Amino acid sequence: EPIQMELDEDEDAAVFEWFYDHRPLQYTKLIKGPSYRQWRLTIPILASLHRLAGQLLSNLSDKNYFYLFDLPSFCTAKALNCAIPG
């Protein structure tokens, strides 16, 4: 299910116009070339995107939180044909 955040016109002024566009900034000088691979974003745009992304990122920094399923250990066990209980 997609997330749509409420943007504030004052705080998010750097990204407010184009944040929900399909290919934002496509015909501006901030995108280098037609390949859409290289970006040159300004500091206010980067700051706004970082602040908005903070709401989406997990704040779980405890490595033991995911102890029930550790993907590298799972792949190693499967590669060695070990029986995985559970």
Image (cartoon, grey):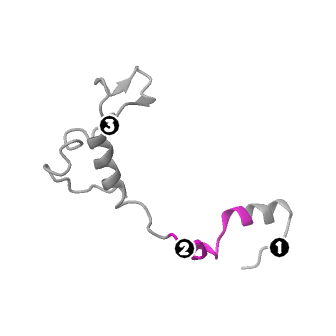
x, y (%) of residue 38? 44, 29
The kind of residue tagged 3 is His
The kind of residue tagged 2 is Asp
* Left or right of 3 on screen, residue 82: right
Q: Residues within 10 Å of mark 1 (few under 14, many from 20)?
A: few
Q: Quadrant of the N terminus?
A: bottom left
Q: Is residue 57 on the magenta stretch? A: no
Q: Residues within 10 Å of mark 3 (few under 14, many from 20)?
A: few
The residue singled out by tag 2 in the image is 62
* Left or right of 50 on screen, residue 16: left
Q: Is 29 in front, or is 74?
A: 29
Q: Which residues are magenta?
A: 61-73
Quadrant of the rendered image containing residue 42: top left
The kind of residue tagged 1 is Ala
As helix, strand or loop, the secondary structure at mark 1 comes to loop
**Which badge, 2 or 3, is on the more N-terminal residue?**
3
As helix, strand or loop, the secondary structure at mark 3 comes to loop
Q: Residue at x 44, y 68 (%)?
A: 59
Residue 2 position (above or below residue 81):
above
x, y (%) of residue 71? 67, 63
The residue singled out by tag 1 in the image is 83
Which disc, if any, is residue 22?
3
